[in-house]
Image (spheres, helix red, strand yellow):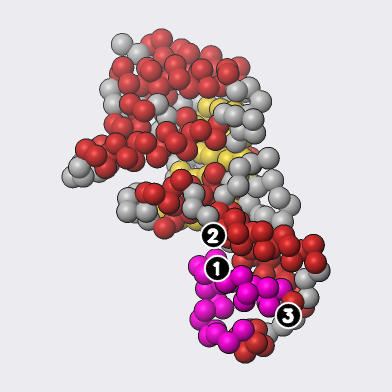
Amino acid sequence: MAPSSPTVASWELSLRLRQRREQVGMDVKTITDRLVFSRNYWSAVENDRKILSEDKLTLLLEILEFDDDEQRELLDLRESAKRRGWWARYSALFSEDLLRLYGLEHGAQGIRTYESLLIPGLLQTEDYARSLIASDLANIRQVEVDQRVEVRMRRQERLTGDDPLHLTAVVSQAALLQQTGGPSVLRRQLLHLISMIESCPDSIQVRVIPFTVTAGGVLGASTFHLIDFASPRLPALAWQETVTAQGIIDNETQVRDLSMTHAQALTQGLNRQDSLDLIRRCAKEIE
């Protein structure tokens, strides 16, 4: 079972409240009148920007006619949502969207990701990550670079342990050749990638799309991640980033389209052994 995440708990709580209100056909005005707060405040609750106090939530659960078991579940979710995840310590460094991504990732069962020119962050070495972060943020202090690298390494802890995150990464062959940080950094990165694939065969899959692939919806695509959860109550979410924009995607149609694109990319990638062999060859050929 994935570790508890206040981000996931808060999201599940707001999602279930909204679904229940719609299910029983209750209008927002009825709720705001009974709980004595504004429509804007309720909108923030339903959109996972506010967490109700315990007494307000208890009253709401009665208004929405949840049974006793679900009331306990939702009150427990509220308690979990009020805790602070390790990522909260870095709120001065990252946007709300990025902090939300880290929280969702921490409580996820699986991540499906695509990268065209880089090794995915969850599989990066410290030197590789540092070279990326330092070049992207050339005007920031060294201590901030160190903290950002620290966060990236902390996120990787979910790849190991009793219930590791399941990672399915599709990368272009170009990511194995782009000399991020220089030849020695890239070589160590590829050796680390090989080690992770071999040591976690049940939870880490890496598929390389070779240069010989001539067409496909993913070619030229920007970085994206699909985040999957163990609970059947929680739909998959997506994260997409370009040079100028990044953010969580919860639109069902867009998430479905990205899922289909990732599935297609898997069919274009080499199988596990051939991907490993290609990564090994690339590592050996670095001068």
Q: How crowded is mark 1: few (under 14 residues within 10 Å), some or many (20 or more)?
A: many
> How far across and down, in percent of the image, does residue 182 sit?
28, 22
> Which badge, 2 or 1, comes first in the chain's sequence?
1
Q: Would you say residue 33 sits in the magenta stretch?
A: no
Residue at coordinates 61% horizontally, 66% vertically from top-left?
A: 14
170 or 22: which is nearer to us?
22
Residue at coordinates 63% horizontally, 51% vertically from top-left?
A: 236
> Which badge, 3 or 2, comes first in the chain's sequence?
3
Front of the two marks 2 and 1: 2
Asked if 83 appears above or below 114 in the picture, the reply is below
Q: Quadrant of the C terminus?
A: top left
Q: Would you say residue 60 sits in the magenta stretch?
A: yes
Instruction: Work out how far the residue at label 2 is from the one at label 1, CA to CA, in angstroms.
Output: 8 Å
Check contact, mark 2 vs mark 1: CB within 8 A.
yes
- The magenta region covers 35-61
Instruction: Work out how far the residue at label 3 is from the one at label 2, CA to CA, in angstroms.
Output: 23 Å
Q: In which quarter of the image is the N terminus?
A: top right
Residue that carries the numbered disc 1 in the rendered image: 51
Q: Mark 3 falls on what kind of element?
A: helix
237 or 76: which is nearer to us?
76
Residue at coordinates 32% horizontally, 21% vertically from top-left?
A: 185
Q: Residues within 10 Å of mark 3 (few under 14, many from 20)?
A: some
Instruction: Work out how far the residue at label 3 is from the one at label 1, CA to CA, in angstroms.
Output: 17 Å
Looking at the rendered structure, which numbered label has been put on residue 82?
2
